[in-house]
Image (cartoon, rainbow, N blue to C red):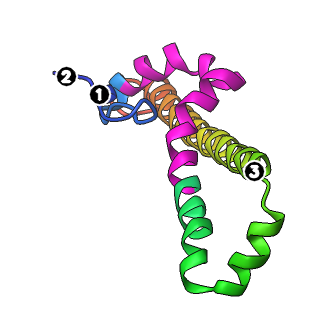
Amino acid sequence: MPSSDYLCRMTGPRDDRAFLDWWAGRRDGWRRLGPALWAGLPVGAALSVPILLNFFAGRFWYRRADAVGSSQFQPLLLVVAVAVIAGFTGWLYSRMQWERNEERYQRIRAGLDGDADTGSDGES
């Protein structure tokens, strides 16, 4: 059975036992900033593109803003602002996904530990 990793690095397998194996191998790596940022960067970029489009499209529908903006426009500031927005959003999305996966991992582990405590016949 092919892994569901091919769609998105942040989505785990649907089967509980496969998810436990998958998350146990990845949970420590995604806690660091680098991998977390790279995993969430596409989401941050997807949010940054509409911001850029809105900024550049404004000159077509509001002439006064274009005149003021052109005289005070600093391209480096725009690039830095968009990069910070994309990075922060990507990091935040990645942390939310990590928390969601960790919660699922703990819930499954608690369920498996509960099954082991009751035994095979279901009696305590």
45 inside magenta stretch: yes
Label 2 sits on residue? 2
Question: In this orientation, which residue lies closer to the viewer: 8 or 70?
Answer: 70
Front disc: 3 or 1: 3
79 with respect to 120 (left or right):
right
Q: Main secondary structure of the magenta part?
A: helix
- In the rendered image, residue 25, in percent from the top left (x then y), is placed at 50, 13
Tag 3 and tag 2, C-beta contact below 8 Å: no
- In the rendered image, residue 67, in percent from the top left (x then y), is placed at 73, 78
The segment highlighted magenta reads 19-47
Front disc: 3 or 2: 3
Q: Quadrant of residue 69?
A: bottom right
Tag 2 and tag 1, C-beta contact below 8 Å: yes
Q: Is residue 12 above or below residue 82?
A: above
Tag 3 and tag 1, C-beta contact below 8 Å: no
Secondary element under disc 1, as helix, strand or loop, is helix
Q: Residue at x 71, y 25 (%)?
A: 33
Label 3 sits on residue? 81
Question: In this orientation, which residue lies closer to the viewer: 7 or 68?
Answer: 68
Which of disc 1 and disc 3 is earlier in sequence? Answer: 1
8 with respect to 61 (left or right):
left
66 with respect to 44 (left or right):
right
Secondary element under disc 2, as helix, strand or loop, is loop
31 inside magenta stretch: yes
Label 1 sits on residue? 6
Label 3 vs label 2: CA separation?
A: 40 Å
